[in-house]
Amino acid sequence: MAADNPAHPVRFPAFATVVVATAALLGGCMTSRVEESKNAATGIGAGESVVILATSYHKGKAVEEDFLSCVNAEVQKGKGGIAVYPERQFTDALFPWFEPRTAPQTAEALPELLSRPGVEERIQARGIRYIVWLNGTTEQTNGGGSLSCAVGPGGGGCFGLTWWEDDASYDAAVWDLRQKADAGSVSADVHGTSMIPALIIPVPLIARTQSAACKDLARELREFIVDGGPAA
C-alpha cells in the first residue's frame, strides 16, 4: 500500500483521462470501458481508509445494494486492497450530516461541512481519508426472440431463441477529506448480450454485466487512490 510522500510533490493537469476498453466472453458477450479523471495527487497511508456511499437520493435512481456491497468487497481484496469503513457506521457516527436531506452534493461543500462543530474530529478519529460517491444502474436496453416449451406423451423439450441486452453504467466521485477537495472520478460501462438458445434443452448464456462493472470500477478505484498519478 502506498503512502503519501510530501517530499516529492507531483503536479497534475486540470483534467487527465485514461481509457481502457476490453471485450470478454463470460457466457454471453460483453464489452467494457473504464475511464479515469484525476484532478489532484492522491495516496493513502497506514491507518487511513475510505467510505463508499451511494448518491441515489439526489441522482434520481438508486444504486443497487448488491452493487454497493460488491464494490466495498472488491476494493478491499488482494495485495493492493484498501481499508473500507462501513457505510452504516459512518452515517450513524456523522448523523445528521450524511443523511439524504443534509449530505453534501459537491466537494465544494466540504469546507463548510467540516467546519461544523465535531464533524472533522469524528472523521479523523475513524481514519477516513476519502469519501467515494457511487452513482449508476444496470438496465435492460433491448431484447427479442421467442422460446417455447412443451410436454407430450413422448417427452418434452424447449425450442427457439431469446436474447436481451444489459448496460451497466457506474461512476465514482472521489473526495479527499484531508485536502477538502474533489480528487477526481472513475467510471465503468459494461454492455452485454445474453441469450438462451434451446433445441430440446435450454442453454443459458448470461452476460453478467453488473458483476463485471463492479470489478472494473473497484480495480480502477484502487489504482486511482493508491497511485499518486502521472507527472504533468
Image (tube, grey):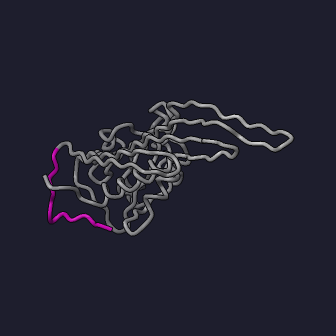
Point out the stretch of residues depicted in magenta: 1-13
Quick one: which residue is furthest to the right in this view? Answer: 153
Task: For the N terminus, give its image quadrant.
Answer: bottom left
Which residue occupies 50% across, 50% down?
211
Estimate the x, y position of residue 41 in percent, counting from the top left: 22, 54
Is residue 181 visible in the rendered image? The answer is no
Which residue occupies 47% across, 41% down?
192
Q: Nearer the viewer, residue 156 or 7?
A: 156
Image height check: is 228 above or below 131? below
Quick one: which residue is furthest to the front in this view? Answer: 154
Query: Does the magenta-highlighted stretch encompass residue 107?
Result: no
Residue 75 position by quadrant: bottom left
Magenta-colored segment: predominant secondary structure: loop
Q: Is residue 222 left or right of residue 91?
A: left
Q: Is residue 68 left or right of residue 177?
A: right
Q: Nearer the viewer, residue 137 or 113?
A: 137
Q: Is residue 114 left or right of residue 61?
A: left
Is residue 32 visible in the rendered image? The answer is yes
Which residue occupies 15% across, 55% down?
231
Query: Does the magenta-highlighted stretch encompass residue 12?
Result: yes
Estimate the x, y position of residue 213 in percent, counting from the top left: 44, 48
